[in-house]
């Protein structure tokens, strides 16, 4: 049964949230769930494409996570407000005719690998660089990057999708490394990778067949599950990789 609560109750009262990639399927669902919650003070929505700002509680700022200056300016736009939750929901699996997940190593292309890593790996790592110093210090505060189960090295039994898999595996390594460093500075911070499940969004659309027996969530369901996972995380979980149901995924 999905919770009707939105805000993770374990965060500070009047929490401030930043969503990077708020225009995406899952990013928007996080936004829609968090914006109306009385426990949330401000939602900072960041997206590459335009975003309608439906509430005075929302501040929007453009971001291109392929551009470090853009990430720095986005972080600066939150001024001195302490952030309680930062969600990185930007990502790429395919783009146009020429960038598709590889069905074989023979289809690897330097340009496509660079693009996928720029968005799925380097972007979120640079978001951590500029947004982690903004996390609230004296209370639980969470930095969560959306990864993917297919980025688990130990769970890879099929091959294929090399660039996407490798970009998420490398993202997980950044998250683990950054979490260890962050724990020394801010022991109450939680830095994690999250797997949202298979979710009906533009990213998954070409690969989710009707009638498949795979569980496919709506973005709203996935966001609700992940908010519940975030609520139950403690500092001891920092550096971990968790699925929508709270289960640990091995790297
Ligand atoms: N859907 C699934 O089944 C699934 C499964 C596992 C993991 N995930 C992960 O979940 C995350 C969200 O995916 P989704 O399904 O919500 O995908 P989506 O609907 O395609 O949204 C992707 C988002 O990433 C943004 N983005 C791409 N490049 C960007 C850049 N350079 N700068 C800023 N934003 C950029 C897009 O912005 P624009 O609106 O400007 O294009 C869009 O907001 C991704 O990291 C994905 O890998 C999804």
Image (spheres, grey):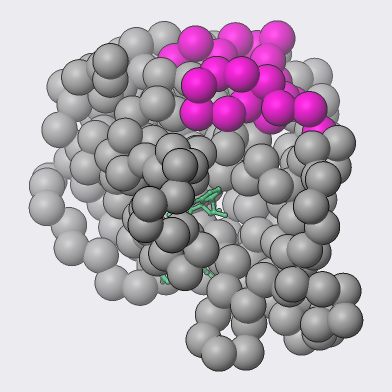
Where on the picture, by quarter, is residue 101? Answer: bottom right
Residue at left offset 49%, top offset 11%: 232
Write the start and end of the magenta stretch as one range: 231-251
Front-lying residue, 230 or 151: 151
Residue reaching furthest to the bottom: 97
Q: What predominant SS class does the magenta segment belong to?
A: loop
Residue at left offset 80%, top offset 19%: 184
Residue 250: x and y in percent read 78, 27
Where on the picture, by quarter, is residue 2? Answer: top left
Q: Is residue 17 left or right of residue 163?
A: left
Q: Indicate whether 234 appears above or below 40.
A: above
Assess whether residue 248 is covered by the magenta stretch: yes
Q: Is residue 100 left or right of residue 139?
A: right
Q: Quadrant of the C terminus?
A: top right
Residue 227: x and y in percent read 40, 25
Front-lying residue, 80 or 23: 23
Assess whether residue 174 is covered by the magenta stretch: no
């Amino acid at each position: 049964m999905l919770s009707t609560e939105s805000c993770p109750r374990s965060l500070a009262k009047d929490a401030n949230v930043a969503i990077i990639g708020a225009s995406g399927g899952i990013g928007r669902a996080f936004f829609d769930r968090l914006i109306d919650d009385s426990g949330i003070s401000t939602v900072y929505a960041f997206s590459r494409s335009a975003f309608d700002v439906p509430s005075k509680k929302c501040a929007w700022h453009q971001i291109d996570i392929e551009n470090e200056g853009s990430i720095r300016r986005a972080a600066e736009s939150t001024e001195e407000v302490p952030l309680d939750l930062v969600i990185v929901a930007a990502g790429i699996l395919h783009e146009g005719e020429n960038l598709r997940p590889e069905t074989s190593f023979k289809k690897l292309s330097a340009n496509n690998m660079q693009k996928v890593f720029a968005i799925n790996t380097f972007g979120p790592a640079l978001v951590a660089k500029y947004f982690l110093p903004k996390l609230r210090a004296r209370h639980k505060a969470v930095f969560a990057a959306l990864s993917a189960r297919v980025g688990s090295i130990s769970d890879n039994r099929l091959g294929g999708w090399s660039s996407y898999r490798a970009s998420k595996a490398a993202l997980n390594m950044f998250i683990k490394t950054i979490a260890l460093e962050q724990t020394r500075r801010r022991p109450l911070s939680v830095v994690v990778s999250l797997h949202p499940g298979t979710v009906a969004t533009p990213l998954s659309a070409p690969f989710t067949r009707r009638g498949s027996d795979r569980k496919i969530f709506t973005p709203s369901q996935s966001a609700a599950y992940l908010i519940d996972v975030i609520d139950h995380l403690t500092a001891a979980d920092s550096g971990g990789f968790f699925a929508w149901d709270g289960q640990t995924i091995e790297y």
